[in-house]
Image (spheres, grey):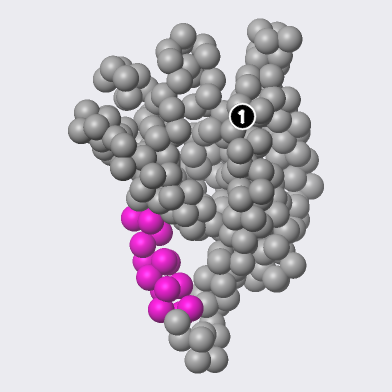
Amino acid sequence: MDILQIIVLALVQGLTEFLPISSSAHLILVPYLTNWSDQGLAFDVAVHVGTLSAVVIYFRKEIKQMFFAWFASLNGNHTEDSKLAWGVLIGTIPVGLAGLLFADFISTSLRTPLVIAETTIIFGFLLWYADWSGKRERDEHSMTWRCVVIVGCAQAIALIPGVSRSGITITAGLMLGLTASAAARFSFLLSIPVILLAGGMETLGYLEVASIDDVNDLLIGAAISAVSAYLCIHVFLKLLDRIGMTPFVMYRMLLGIILLNIYL
């Protein structure tokens, strides 16, 4: 990979991971549209690790509170923070199981522009409906276990390229009555164990056969994606209650239509 490809793909990942427009879809589409060779799973994992570091740093205070509250809950001391920590852990189970069962099929059969076009439109419409119909009465600390499981199952669907992990979890949160900012915050917290588990496993396997040049490319990509993702989280949460989901729905619809015209 040359430096331009590394920079572009890392920025794409950083700017799309936490927006409801599917980072995995864009990482697949960029090589198709630029005639670049596929960057490979290792680079995808590296830039996802970059975005993981961004969300951990951004929510470091909340994560620290949740971490100690979770340990205290093991002795029966339950608080809002411990409940949220348990919610993140329980909400991760469905995507973990789905990944074990369907990862090979998804990676070999569903990483195509046509699949991305269809899921981009379908789940963009669902995002619009949730944004329009959601009651927006609750924050993430008020989620019931039923809500946690529903959002967790929604996250598992995002293994399909084009669905968008943040998009489908925010959609589910809005449909369950969360405010937009609460749905986004829970979605971002929910991303931490998912990226950590997937990225950790793939990285350990890759480093056994990687060359020094390969590792340097991965480190550069991870750093760029981390900085851009941090800025994206900050701006997105600041503007979310003001702009809603409409701009992202419009983008998804336009992208999906363009892809259908190109690849049908």
Q: Which residue has dot 1 on it?
A: 108
Callout 1 secondary element: helix
Q: In the rendered view, would you say 116 is above or below 206?
A: above
Q: Nearer the viewer, residue 185 or 166?
A: 166
The residue shown at (67%, 64%) is: 148
| Outermost residue, front side | 209
The residue shown at (72%, 35%) is: 123
Expressed as whole percent of the image width and height from the top left, the position of residue 61 reads: 37, 66
Total of numbered circles in the picture?
Answer: 1
Which picture quadrant has residue 141?
Answer: bottom right
Q: Residues within 10 Å of mark 1 (few under 14, many from 20)?
A: few
Q: In the rendered view, would you say 28 is above or below 160?
A: above
- Locate residue 212 relative to residue 99 in the image: left or right: left
Which picture quadrant has residue 245?
Answer: top right
Which picture quadrant has residue 20?
Answer: top right
**Callout 1, which amino acid?**
Thr
- Locate residue 27 relative to residue 42 in the image: left or right: right
Expressed as whole percent of the image width and height from the top left, the position of residue 98 reads: 66, 50
- The range drawn in magenta is 56-70
Q: In the rendered view, would you say 4 is above or below 20?
A: above
Residue 57 colored in magenta in the image: yes
Expressed as whole percent of the image width and height from the top left, the position of residue 213 reads: 22, 28
